[in-house]
């Protein structure tokens, strides 16, 4: 009975504690559009991946020649990160936590096709989904913790729990986390920067709301 009462007290106390972490900024990339906390920041009539990426690259003046040699997943990761990091300069301790459904299947298929004639080394280097983490780290000089997870659908609980574990353990002062998926040319990107800087409370519910914005269907 005493144990049950103590557990009830701890749960009640925890529920009353203010949220320690906040979504400092976010970006959504889908269907030829890019949104962030300020609203629509880019729109293109080219919703197919490569023309869209080229148009966005020119619009934001990325000036990063290596971008053109990357696979589609890495390009999307760099583009989305750029939108956030332009206003929120990262440090070498900024952590990266990203997930998707398709892993690196898009480039895996292209590499498999290339083996019918001559296996392409430039494609092979991107046949792991976590390569995008390396590309983001190189461009923004990030040297902190990172993780890439494969899940059936957008998993707010996974992202929240892993991100919070890094922040609470003080392995990172801030975390860029979210969903970065590319399948058959269809791209679906949502990244957010989480820190102690007060803005949108960091919760599963708010992650889902931001991800499901712009008329997306709700996920679990």
Image (spheres, rainbow, N blue to C red):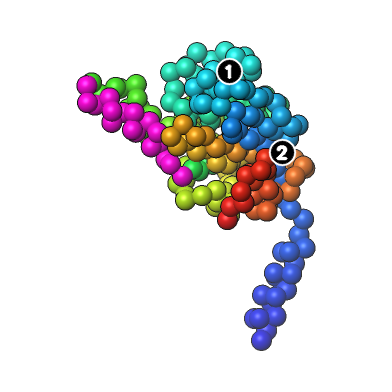
Give the quarter of the figure containing the N terminus: bottom right
Residue bearing the label numbered 2: 24
The quarter of the picture where residue 79 lies is top right
Element under disc 1: helix
Residue 60 colored magenta? no
Q: Identify which residue, 132 or 73, lies in the foreground.
A: 73
Q: Which residue lies at the image location 51% right of the left edge and 26% below the top edge?
A: 48
Give the quarter of the figure containing the C terminus: bottom right
Residue 108 colored magenta? yes
Q: Residues within 10 Å of mark 1 (few under 14, many from 20)?
A: some
Q: Position of residue 65 (x, y in %)?
A: 50, 13
Q: Residue furthest left?
A: 117
Q: CA distance from mark 1 to mark 2?
A: 27 Å
Q: Identify which residue, 12 or 213, lies in the foreground.
A: 213
Residue bearing the label numbered 1: 55
Tell us which disc is closer to us: 1 or 2: 1
Element under disc 2: strand
């Amino acid at each position: 009975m005493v144990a049950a009462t103590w557990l009830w007290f701890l749960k009640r106390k925890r529920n009353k504690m203010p949220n320690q972490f906040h979504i400092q900024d976010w970006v959504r990339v889908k269907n030829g559009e890019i949104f962030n906390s300020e609203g629509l920041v880019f729109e293109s009539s080219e919703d197919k991946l490569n023309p869209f990426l080229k148009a966005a690259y020119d619009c934001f003046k990325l000036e990063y020649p290596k971008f053109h040699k990357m696979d589609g997943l890495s390009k999307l990761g760099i583009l989305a990160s750029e939108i956030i990091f332009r206003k929120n300069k990262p440090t070498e301790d900024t952590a990266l936590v990203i997930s998707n459904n398709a892993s690196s299947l898009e480039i895996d298929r292209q590499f498999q096709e290339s083996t019918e004639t001559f296996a392409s080394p430039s494609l092979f280097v991107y046949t792991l989904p976590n390569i995008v983490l390396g590309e983001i780290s190189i461009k923004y000089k990030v040297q902190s913790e990172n993780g890439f997870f494969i899940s059936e659908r957008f998993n707010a609980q996974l992202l929240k729990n892993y991100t919070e574990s890094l922040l609470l353990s003080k392995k990172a002062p801030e975390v860029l986390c979210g969903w970065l998926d590319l399948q058959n040319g269809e791209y679906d990107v949502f990244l957010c920067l989480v820190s102690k800087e007060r803005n949108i409370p960091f919760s599963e519910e708010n992650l889902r709301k931001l991800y499901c914005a712009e008329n997306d269907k709700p996920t679990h």
